Amino acid sequence: MPDFITDTVLLWPLAIPLATAALCAAAWASPRVQQAASLTGLVLTLGASLVLLDAVMAQGIVTKQFGGWAPPFGISFVADRFGAAMVVISGVLALAAGLFAIADVRRRQVKAGFYPLFQGLMVGVNGAFLTGDIFNLYVWFEVMLIATLGLITLDRTRAQLDGAIKYAVLNLFSTILFLMAIGLLYGVTGTLNMADLARVLPQTDGSMALTVSAMLFLLAFGIKAGFFPLFFWLPASYHTATIIVSAVFAGLLTKVGVYACFRVFTLLFEVNDGGIRPIVAFFAAGTMLFGVFGAAIQWDIRRILSFHIISQIGYIMLGLAIATPLAMAGAVFYIIHHIVVKANLFFVAGAIHRATGTYDLRKAGGLMKASPLLAVLFLVPALSLAGIPPLSGFWAKFMVIDASFRADMAWLGALALFVGLLTVFSMSKIWIEAFWKTSPRKVSRVRAVPVAMLVPIAALGAITLAIGFNPEPLVAFANVAAGTMTDPAEFIAAVFAERQIAGATP
């Protein structure tokens, strides 16, 4: 591989979607050119992400200091196993969404800027996963916010504008909290480089400013991730967007908030300090419980799935609340599994809408007979989300629940088991209403689902089955990733040694 590529391996997952966004914007009047450019860009981005992951697995944490400034003064990019895996799974989801868009995105939505905004969102997501600077994390969040607002309002309907306003207000409030937390942290430590903060903070006396900073970070990321009790904006806005946009949001956006939370509360602050653990445990329990209760009373498939995003975020936060290596590994496994499964369920919801013309389960039905393939493709992510063995969701739930019992936090594990039962109820409700019962409409009105929709659904289902029937490689990967997160020494050493691919020893 040429030295130029290996030396800039951290840059490509951002540079490719950025260049693709510019190309799509330049081809504004040609939807076909935009579609082709977007698909090509997504394939290249996924390829670059896989190269980065391979480099991290072969040579350890990869870092890059831009601008010729040594850390902590330069702009740092860092990829450990957790960050690199997030970039890869984001690439997989984005490519699936790109294929789904062939059949789902309409000409007027393309002219409204779908492809440039979609690529811009991927720039923000990958930047957030790879940045090594807490202030630049804020910058990437703002890039995502701008792209997200454009994607929510593609059709400019009243419902979309209402959802966008709720999304924008809550996220701007989150941004203010984030900036206040950064300001307090910089005032105490004089640095914003994450590795430098991880080095300096253990040597800094505890203070009210640091405690307040930690709480502000938790609240800011909690809003973006959809924690209890800050989640209400999510089901109020996600279901208003087009289904492909909802699928990408469901898979990625909340996970960026979760990722930031794990990064800050493993690298900078410890969950054991300042009473953070009980707060995170309370958030995790409330998120699981209220999310699944909210899903149980809904009839719109998109709203059911939106509430389930919240519920499943609670499971992931369970790992951070326990904060043992086993729990952190379970959280890493859960995040990767959930991105695939949740996005796939939204794709299936889009296919159900295409077949029946409605997202309202009371008006749908008869798909088991009319589209048995879609029924099978729904069962894979639905049963996985519910945690039915041996699918990927079973292993994810098993790891975090097992960790909770081992860490003497059995009440959290028991609550997670109870929430799992209610998740089965919600998935059964979709199955019975959309697939099993007789359609309240004439069967002749059921339309065929395009192949371009079924291919990404089947591909993500295949990934779910592969993880479920052979979980050992991902479990082993998650264990190593969790070890890196719970021991910041390797992260600090990698950044300050400015360890780069070209100079590393295989």
Image (cartoon, rainbow, N blue to C red):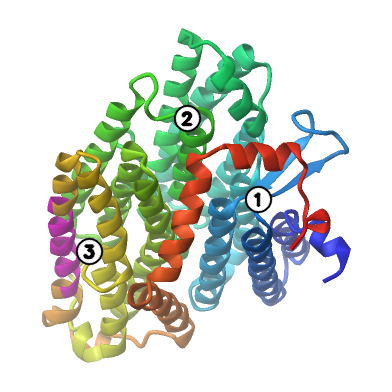
Q: Nearer the viewer, residue 382 or 266?
A: 266
| Residue 423 counted in the magenta span | yes
Name the spot of residue 101 as percent of width and height, x first. 53, 72
Q: Which mark is residue 386?
A: 3
Instruction: Name, please, the residue furthest toward the front.
Output: 505
Mark 2 = which residue?
174
Task: State whether residue 266 is above or below residue 435.
Answer: above
Q: In terms of secondary structure, where does tag 3 sit?
A: helix
Specify few, some or many for label 1: CA neighbours under 10 Å numbering under 14, 14-19, or 20 or more.
many
Image quarter of residue 58: bottom right
Q: Which mark is residue 61?
A: 1
Specify few, some or many for label 3: CA neighbours under 10 Å numbering under 14, 14-19, or 20 or more.
many
Earlier residue among tags 2 and 3? 2
Q: Amino acid at mark 1?
A: Ile
Q: Quadrant of the C terminus?
A: bottom right
For marks 3 and 1, give the one nearer the viewer: 1
Q: Residue at x 41, y 55 (%)?
A: 335
Name the spot of residue 21 as percent of width and height, x first. 71, 59
Give me the C-alpha separation between circle 1 and circle 2. 30 Å
Task: State whether residue 451 is above or below residue 102.
Answer: below
Earlier residue among tags 1 and 2? 1
Viewer can see residue 297: no
Give me the C-alpha separation between circle 2 and circle 3. 31 Å
For marks 1 and 2, give the one nearer the viewer: 1
